[in-house]
Amino acid sequence: MRAGLAEFGISLDPGDDEDLAFEPLLTDRYVLAVHRGHPWAEHESVTLRDLADTRLIIGGRDSGNRLLLEMLLGHESISLR
């Protein structure tokens, strides 16, 4: 857009930018899938901190969702196993 090659773009929230205006289009929720017998199955929500010592199955390294999840966990000083 800055180079004049497009009038608009659709992306994940890039954060603050003084040169561009952003308008949210929708909210996408992350969900956690666990077996019905898992202790979290009865929880209404699970925090990022809850995931700190948990083995997770997530998308590959080239997944935009994985990148976003790693960024969110990084803000909480949590690394993935």
Image (cartoon, rainbow, N blue to C red):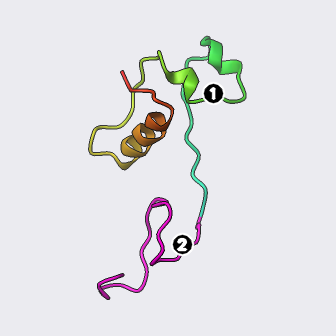
In this rendered view, identify the residue nearer to me: 77 or 58.
77
Residue 29 pos. (x, y %): 59, 46
Instruction: Write down the quadrant of residue 39 in the picture.
Output: top right
- Residue 40 lies, in percent from the top left, at 63, 18
- In the image shown, does 19 or 52 lie closer to the viewer? 19
Residue at 68% x, 30% y: name it. 45
Disc 1: CA contacts within 10 A as few (<14), some (14-19) or many (>=20): few
Label 1 sits on residue? 46
| Residue located 65% across and 20% down the image | 41
The dominant secondary structure in magenta is loop
Give the residue pinned by disc 2: 22
Q: Where are the magenta residues, as a range?
A: 1-25
Residue depicted at 36% across the width and 49% down the height: 64
Query: Is residue 13 a member of the stretch shown in magenta?
Result: yes
Of marks 2 and 1, the one in the foreground: 2
> Residue at left 71%, top 19%?
42
Q: In terms of secondary structure, where does tag 1 sit?
A: loop
Q: Does the magenta stretch include residue 3?
A: yes
Looking at marks 2 and 1 on the same chain, the residue that comes earlier in the sequence is marked by 2
